Amino acid sequence: MNLSEISKTVSHALRHEPWLYEFELDPEGWVPVDDLIAALRRHRDDWKSLNRSDLTEMIEKSQKQRHEIVNGRIRAFYGHSISGLLKKEVLEPPSLLYHGTNPEIITPIMSEGLKPMGRQYVHLSSDVETAIEVGRRKSRNPVILTVEACKAHDQGIRFYLGNEKVWLADDVPPTFLIYDLEKSQMR
């Protein structure tokens, strides 16, 4: 089985439209692994043999830790468009975080700040390389914004750890954003 296809489908099911797969997430985004497997088997005829070890392998081999399995349940760490999921613990972020985006929307971002835009949280990267990778999903030549995360946190902006490379925020006002054209062009 193609682990990348499984990962994309699991992400879609757990982050965006669980009802299409005929299961419900609990208030923290969890679903029993057996329910997810049964749903995926119904969804794709060629996945009739899908099992727990396939999901475990998908998680272990993924470069981006998007999912977790605990006590027979699975959930996506971040990226949800379904409101009310993933109640996270507020943590102090690193001094700086990064956000890669499309250069065509830099003007509204610099005037209005970063907003979740259909997701539950704003996604930020702990390093420039990850921000570039994320930004390339939106543009061949993304803009990289630096977020003064510690200053924002000190001013009451809430940050949450998604995984070792992803931080989440409810929003980030423009006063904490730095647009460095040179850094964006150094790729």
Image (tube, rainbow, N blue to C red):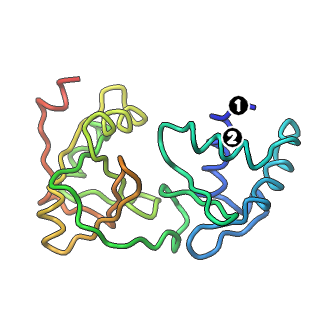
Q: Which mark is residue 154?
A: none
Instruction: Residue under label 1, please give it.
Output: 2
Reply above or below: 103 against 19: above
Which residue: 31% across, 47% down? 125
On the image, the x and y values in percent for residue 165 come to 35, 47
Q: Residues within 10 Å of mark 2 (few under 14, many from 20)?
A: some
Q: Quadrant of the N terminus?
A: top right
On the image, the x and y values in percent for residue 8 come to 62, 42
Q: Are marks 1 and 2 in contact (CB under 8 Å)?
A: yes
Please state which of residues 63 and 186 is positioned toward the viewer in this rendering. 63
Tell whether 38 sits left or right of 67.
right
For the residue marked with disc 1, what is the amino acid?
Answer: Asn
Reply above or below: 185 against 37: above
Q: Quadrant of the C terminus?
A: top left
Instruction: Residue under label 2, please give it.
Output: 6
On the image, the x and y values in percent for residue 40 come to 79, 49
For the residue marked with disc 2, what is the amino acid?
Answer: Ile
Tell whether 74 sits left or right of 82.
right
Tell whether 169 sits left or right of 45.
left
Label 1 secondary element? loop
Res. 167 image quadrant: bottom left
Q: Residues within 10 Å of mark 1 (few under 14, many from 20)?
A: few
- Between the C-alphas of marks 1 and 2, the distance is 6 Å
